[in-house]
Image (tube, rainbow, N blue to C red):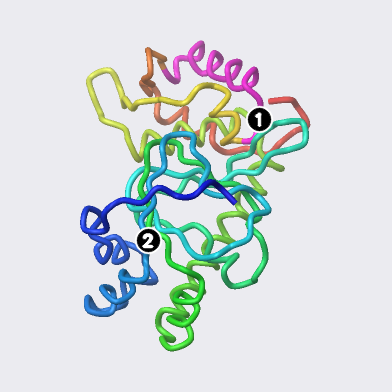
Amino acid sequence: MPTEPRTMAMSALDPPETLRRVPFFAVLPLEELKVLAGHCMARRLLKDETLVAEGDPCDGLFVVQAGAVKLFKMAENGREQILVIERAGSTVGELTVFDGGKFPASAVAVEDSTLLFLPKREFLELCQRNSEVAFAVIRSLAWRFRYLASLVEELSLKEVSHRLARFLRDRALNLGVRTKRGIEFPLEETNQEIGAEIGTVRDLVSRNLRRFVDRGIIRLERRKVIVLDTAELEAQVSGAKRGSAG
């Protein structure tokens, strides 16, 4: 297990409001949220600090209060594949709480983050006595299954250029600001980090970014991307893998 967690004052986190942001806790009235919050412990992580390592036993559920945590698998050769990045209102560990196994992936903070930890016993007892919460958890797990199925499809059937285009398109939709130059959004990740998220290596990310620039689809500035041709970027998102390296 990771080192002893650092704690912080519960009042600073406003735990009931943190729990309310989780879809399967949002069905609870405020008084029950306050009771549930009373069982929680606060945790602060610095950027790059490990929350859990793959194979750790699961003692409970984590709720992201602020910041971001990446879940990832690491191959024997050191190559990393990011499964998902969880942000405020998201949870880590509910599947492992139910199946009684160990964490199937590692979780590390990608920025300074705060989380709430709800012990396994309290979470399971809540699901047993409140069917509405239990069914909401089932819906959440079903969504995760669909997401992971689509990730497998993306990694196995799509070329690197299509996966990179989707990454850029999604960033433009979520973070982009329309300006006279195009749709601009920040890009803090290195090419290696982008590769870990889309399932490839740094060199292929660099090569395809240059290709998008040469074709006039995007412009790269320091820590910023400007989408010049949204229609062509969208067109790059589709397409099946044809056996090329990307």
Q: Is residue 51 above or below residue 22?
A: above
Q: Secondary structure at mark 1?
A: loop
Image coordinates for residue 223, horizontal then vertical, percent:
38, 18
Q: Is residue 161 above or below residue 132?
A: above
- Between 4 and 167, the residue placed more toward the observer is 4
Image coordinates for residue 18, horizontal then vertical, percent:
29, 60
Residue plotted at (56% across, 15% down): 211
Q: Are marks 2 and 1 in contact (CB under 8 Å)?
A: no
Which region shows up in magenta?
Answer: 199-218
Asked where in the image residue 80 lies, by quadrant, the reply is: top right
CA gap, disc 2 and disc 1: 37 Å
Q: Taken as a whole, is the magenta stretch helix, strand or loop? A: helix
Residue most toward the bottom? 129
Mark carried by residue 67: none
The residue that label 2 is drawn on is 41
Image coordinates for residue 206, horizontal then vertical, percent:
58, 16
Disc number lying in front (2 or 1) = 2
Q: Is residue 102 magenta?
A: no
The residue that label 1 is drawn on is 200
Q: Secondary structure at mark 2?
A: strand
Image coordinates for residue 30, horizontal then vertical, percent:
22, 75
Q: Is residue 216 magenta?
A: yes
Residue plotted at (47% across, 79% down): 135
- Between 177 and 74, the residue placed more toward the observer is 74
Disc 2 residue type (three-letter)? Met
Disc 1 residue type (three-letter)? Thr
Question: Relative to residue 130, is residue 99 drawn left or right?
Answer: right
